Amino acid sequence: MQANRKSEQAAPAVSGKQVIARDRFDAVVFDLDGVITKTAQVHAGAWKRMFDDFLRARASATGEAFRPFDADSDYRLYVDGKPRFAGVAGFLESRGIALPLGEADDGDDRMTIHGLGNRKNRYFHQYLAEHGVAVFDSSVSLVHALRQAGIKTALVSSSRNAAAVLAAAKLVELFDVRVDGNDLARLGLNGKPAPDLFLRAAAELDVRPARAVIVEDAISGVAAGRAGHFGLVIGVDRRGEPDALAGAGADVVVSNLGEVTVAAAPPPTNALARFGEIEARLAGKRASVFLDYDGTLTPIVARPDLALISEGMRTALRALAGRCTVAVVSGRDLADVKRLVGLDDLVYAGSHGFDISGPGGLRIEHERGARFAAAAARAAEWLKPALAGIAGALVEPKRFAVAVHYRQVAAVEVAQVEAIVDQALAAEPELRKTGGKKVFELRPRFDWDKGKAVNWLLAALGQSAAQYLPFYLGDDLTDEDAFAALADNGVTIFVGEPRQTAARYVLADVDEVGAFLAKLTEVVDKR
């Protein structure tokens, strides 16, 4: 925990302003209900309807007085932020009522904990279908600002309905990771106030909790963020209870997320113009160079099969590889990128670093690969006929993933392409959706990315930070993981028109990449 965090006993002061700075935080993890969407009242209403039905019937059968569920205090104390069945059990316990647990698929007419939970879920979906879902505009604006600043975003919810709520609100693409009640059950995690859900989101984002922010409106959620030792916990006071949120561990309490601003990282500078600065960092060290393929070694083209490396770039790679480690880290399959580059002396990391090979028998493939490969293959087979009627849509099957390219799809049909991809995702829970340049990709829901692949390679090759200076050049959103991983001990270069990025330097295009590699080869050769 950071030294400037307040003590466990001290209640942090309520503040009307909070800045999330890109140089301090890598990610922000949001609760859903009451923070992003205005579904807390819908949930509370569904809980009240279900419990009042149950309590009224019980009172009639036993002769007890009917005491209704309080949609304010009972909801806040016993069910808010908790998994559905834990909420049922918690409220019933508060009334001294014991029911059997039952089975997860109990009908909603069964007098079991699962049966009552399923009835509440039916009431919730009825409302969602009839009325849709409203959002907090200030919250959505903050998410957009964070993503523009290159800060990752995740969505956490104890509800199993998070995906349906996000889809109804048209917010799916605003979050890099979603961890919800389905993951809670599948992975055997503990619900709030335990920090498991938030820690899982941080792991999937590949960020340290100390470099992440939690945004919560529930007392149990704030307590979970504090228990996970996150760098900043923001409480959103929707109920006029700032002291309760502060007492649960919020570092700052705001009335809405319009009071939170984002400070972006400084823009990257041109790597060729600052080459002297980069050369100075090589003093006493050896270089190790990692490069993306599409958009970095070759220009972006209409179809992935047309992205062919030039002989000039291949010559530049061959020359540099004769003097230091050179690795190509690509979202393409390993066999595909090796064939396209066509050089034996390079290290290749295909499938975003999920499948790695190189000289001297270097080889790593995750033991869970076969299961992910099967899920990706099923998704690809389903997507091909599903997208066949949309002109320009291209399905690219990969060993551990499937990409859907929409560069040639009419703008009015892109939303339909995404909706079909989301259907495939719903059928394959072991995959997660990511984005890129005019592409949706279903990749393994697994804690692995280009940043982890680069760090693994550096360790496997025995290239310590004391002796080696790693370089990473890439152009896509998936390369941001590598930029973040090497932020403190490497040279990170974004390729393309300037945008918000975690990279320190920029090169305009593939031609500048070639010029940079040539200059680097000269320097390495001298050393």
Image (cartoon, grey):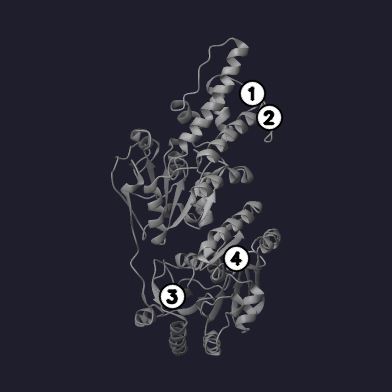
**Which residue in the structure is indicated by mark 4?**
404
Amino acid tagged 3: Gly
Q: Nearer the viewer, residue 410 or 220?
A: 410
Amino acid tagged 2: Gly
Quarter of the rendering containing residue 384 = bottom right
Q: Which structural element holds mark 4? A: strand
Q: Which residue is situated farthest in the top direction here?
A: 63
Q: Confirm or deny contact between disc 2 and disc 1 (CB under 8 A).
A: yes
Between the C-alphas of marks 1 and 3, the distance is: 61 Å
Q: Dot 4 surroundings within 10 Å: few (below 14), some, or many (20 or more)?
A: many
**Which residue in the structure is indicated by mark 1?**
99
Residue located 30% across and 40% down the image? 14
**Which residue in the structure is indicated by mark 2?**
102
Q: Confirm or deny contact between disc 4 and disc 1 (CB under 8 A).
A: no
Q: Is residue 450 above or below residue 2?
A: below
**Which residue in the structure is indicated by mark 3?**
496
Q: Confirm or deny contact between disc 4 and disc 2 (CB under 8 A).
A: no
Q: Going from the N terminus, do you reach mark 4 or mark 2 first?
A: 2
Q: Is residue 4 left or right of residue 485?
A: left
Q: Confirm or deny contact between disc 2 and disc 3 (CB under 8 A).
A: no
Q: Nearer the viewer, residue 512 or 71?
A: 71
Q: Is residue 170 something that shows in the picture?
A: yes
Question: Where residue 354 sits in the image (x, y, percent)?
Answer: 61, 66
Amino acid tagged 1: Leu
